[in-house]
Image (tube, grey):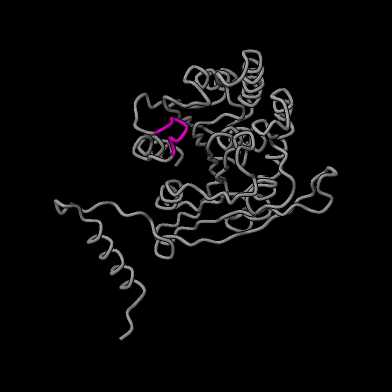
Amino acid sequence: MRRSRAARRLTAWAVLSIAAAGVNGQELKPSYIFGVDYTFERVRATRKSGDTADPADITLVSYVYRPLRTDRHQVVVWSHGSTNSMAFPPGEPRGVPPTMIDFFTSRGYTLVAPSRRGVGESSGTYREECAVWAGKCTRAEYLELFESGLAEAVLDTSAVIDQNILGGLVPRDSRLLLAGQSRGGFLSLVMAAERPALVSGVVNFVGGWLSINDLWSAEDNEKALKLQLDRLSTIGARVRAPTVWLYAARDPFYAESTTRRFYRAFTEAGGKGEYFFVPTHTLKSGHELGSNPSLWERAVDEFLKSLQ
């Protein structure tokens, strides 16, 4: 007799429970499983570049992870980080951190992760950064890309929201949760200012657009800091949604003092937010905070509950 889909799922969970049992017989929490707990698909949006680098339309590929068991019919838009000044090719596939897939789909959110222009499977020329480490541009030229790079990222994300999410995955009058890591966290805050009526909340993991550390001159660091503080001061008054900012010690890109200045610039301008800092951890780098949910899961759960 052919077993029902529910019976097959129960068997799968039973196998996982046995395999995950520790030496003391204690059951460990299994990860969410593709095909059992969530589905995966690619969706595509297009936009015009507005410049001569890409005369044809740009195709933007997004990964969609949809929960099967606890679908709350709400979307979180996940924004990825940078290429670290093109230290690795932007065209390399950009997978979503498994911790984020597990966290959001297990709570009933559909996770949509756009790859921006020239990143991963998306077409077009990557224009957010230049190759400082390869000696193909100066740090000054790199900093000059701040405004245009952010503008490009906003256009890409908006195209995905308008063409793939609203009216597709959820009704057009839905509100969206924005989340992201590093540049993606900073972009999520900017997007919440660009489209305030659309956003229910922002989860900012180790957010920042331009790194500030001893690799750069004091003058370069001061300029990078000012660019970001000015932008955060500008958007604070326009963001209506609550936000949560998550950082950790030993982040090589953003010291605690820097991130607290980011947060202060945003909130003093009128933005609503909570700042969450992890002072001790065993991660190789504080910038990898998102890889260990035990460090932030409770804080983000409390934030998500506050949005309901």
Q: Position of residue 183 (x, y in %)?
A: 59, 34
Going 41% across and 50% down the picture, which residue do you hit? 102
The one nearer the camera, 16 or 6, is 16
Above or below — where is 117 with respect to 284? below
The number of discs equals 0
Q: Position of residue 34 (x, y in %)?
A: 43, 61
Q: Position of residue 301 (x, y in %)?
A: 39, 40
Quadrant of the image occupied by residue 270: top right
Query: Which residues are drawn in magenta?
Result: 284-290
Going 47% across and 51% down the picture, which residue do you hit? 109
The one nearer the camera, 230 or 49, is 49
Farthest-out residue, bottom: 1
Farthest-out residue, left: 24
Q: Position of residue 239 (x, y in %)?
A: 60, 30
Above or below — where is 14 with respect to 219? below
Farthest-out residue, top: 218
Q: Main secondary structure of the magenta part?
A: helix
Residue 292 magenta? no
